[in-house]
Image (cartoon, rainbow, N blue to C red):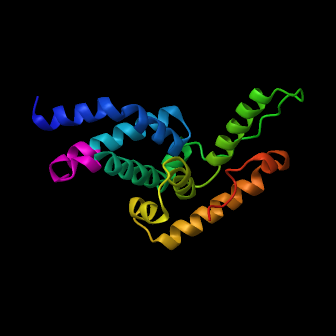
Amino acid sequence: MDERVRDLSAFIDARSCSLLRFAYLLTGDHGLAEDLLQSSLIKVYLTWGRIRDRAALEAYTRTVMTRTQLSWWRRPARRELLGVELTERVVRDHHHDPERDQVVERDELWALLATLGPRQRAVLVLRFYEDLSEAEIARVLGCSAGTVKSQLSRGLARLRERMPAETRTRNTLMEEPR
């Protein structure tokens, strides 16, 4: 086994769970997340010789994952496979159980997030899950900071309008960052 394969194997062993969670947030589907991670790791492997800063390897891999996911959405045939149709809201029981309500709210929020376009979802995931700044998101997506701001604003607005009113009043994530 050559050094490149050993180094990449060590990286995958150490970071695969975190990268898979990130892929799931981008795709909203476990199977697609696994495909995205595998495709991205192949791309990282193929460019391994050009990667100079091994310390920034995870950030580079996340950038590859984000761009790969966005490129999948540009192919019409792939859109059908990715399940672009909107998910319907699940009707829940009316008895009050705070723990269950939290889980249902979280699931509804994930379902709403899945209704967004890939770029808006990527911006929201990078901003709120990865806690990246607008400038860092712009670098990852290869776009301007203004594009990131508009995608963030539009994505949050879409989530707000699609979110049920009772959930909207309790959810603090829906507040725009200042």
Pinpoint residue 72: horizontal percent, then vertical percent.
45, 50
Question: Which residue is located at x 49 percent, y 47 percent?
Answer: 78
Question: Which residue is located at x 28 percent, y 47 percent?
Answer: 57
Question: Which residue is located at x 27 percent, y 35 percent?
Answer: 11
Figure quadrant of residue 88: top right
Along the viewing direction, whichever of 172 and 117 lies nearer the viewer: 172
Q: What's the magenta region?
A: 43-56
Along the viewing direction, whichever of 105 and 45 lies nearer the viewer: 105
Pinpoint residue 174: horizontal percent, then vertical percent.
69, 54
- Residue that extends furthest to the left in the rendered view of this protein: 2
* For residue 53, side relative to residue 94 (left or right): left
Pinpoint residue 31: horizontal percent, then vertical percent.
49, 32
Magenta-highlighted stretch: main secondary structure? helix
Is residue 48 placed above or below 153 in the rendered structure? above
Is residue 140 placed above or below 21 in the rendered structure? below
Residue 105 among those drawn in magenta: no
Is residue 170 placed above or below 178 in the rendered structure? above
Pinpoint residue 164: horizontal percent, then vertical percent.
81, 47
Along the viewing direction, whichever of 126 and 143 lies nearer the viewer: 126
* For residue 11, side relative to residue 78 (left or right): left
Residue 45 among those drawn in magenta: yes
